[in-house]
Image (cartoon, helix red, strand yellow):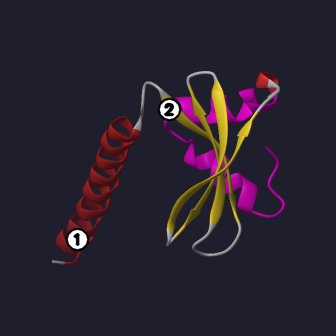
């Protein structure tokens, strides 16, 4: 009886992991856009942030708040190489859990 309970818990955990990974992957594909990309985001407070949005080859600085989205400025003279690191991380739409976790665990080397 205890073995069956243990086996059931393991099965539920495995199915939860698989389902979460499946749904997360599908969700990221729907969120991807061919013509627009959020290059960088900075949270100002819990519900306010500033975003750099790339639309084709143009960059825009936007403010996001509960009141709506506002254009702060169209950015000129952008160094494309400054954003390549960020774009490389987010282009796959997937994150390695082990890498993210290692950033928050003290004493762990990358």
In the rendering, at what x and y percent does residue 79 appear? 82, 26
In the rendering, at what x and y percent does residue 8 appear? 20, 67
Instruction: Give the vertical position of 13 relative to 29 (above or below).
Output: below
Q: Nearer the viewer, residue 53 or 17?
A: 53
Instruction: Give the vertical position of 76 relative to 42 (above or below).
Output: above
Label 2: state its secondary structure: strand
Name the residue tied to disc 1.
Answer: 3
Q: Residue at x 71, y 53 (%)?
A: 102
Instruction: Give the vertical position of 27 relative to 42 (above or below).
Output: above
Q: Nearer the viewer, residue 90 or 104?
A: 90
Residue 6 in which image quadrant? bottom left
Neighbour tally class for label 1: few under 14, some 14-19, many 20 plus, Cα within 10 Å: few
Q: Residue at x 29, y 59 (%)?
A: 16
Residues in magenta, as a range: 82-110
Residue 108 is inside the magenta segment: yes
Q: Residue at x 64, y 63 (%)?
A: 49
Query: What type of secondary structure mainly makes up the magenta span?
Result: helix
Residue 53 lies left or right of residue 2; in this view the side is right
Tag nearer the camera, 2 or 1: 2
The disc, 2 or 1, on the residue closer to the chain's N-terminal end is: 1
Name the residue tied to disc 2.
Answer: 36
């Amino acid at each position: 009886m205890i073995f069956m309970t243990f086996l059931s818990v393991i099965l539920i955990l495995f199915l939860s992991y698989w389902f979460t990974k499946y749904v997360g992957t599908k969700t990221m594909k729907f969120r991807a856009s061919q013509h627009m990309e959020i290059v960088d985001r900075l949270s100002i407070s819990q519900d306010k942030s500033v975003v750099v949005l790339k639309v084709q080859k143009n960059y825009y600085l936007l403010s996001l708040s509960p009141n709506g989205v506002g254009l702060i400025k169209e950015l000129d003279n952008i160094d494309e190489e400054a954003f390549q690191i960020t774009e490389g991380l987010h282009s796959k739409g997937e994150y390695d859990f082990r890498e993210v976790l290692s950033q928050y665990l003290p004493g762990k080397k990358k």
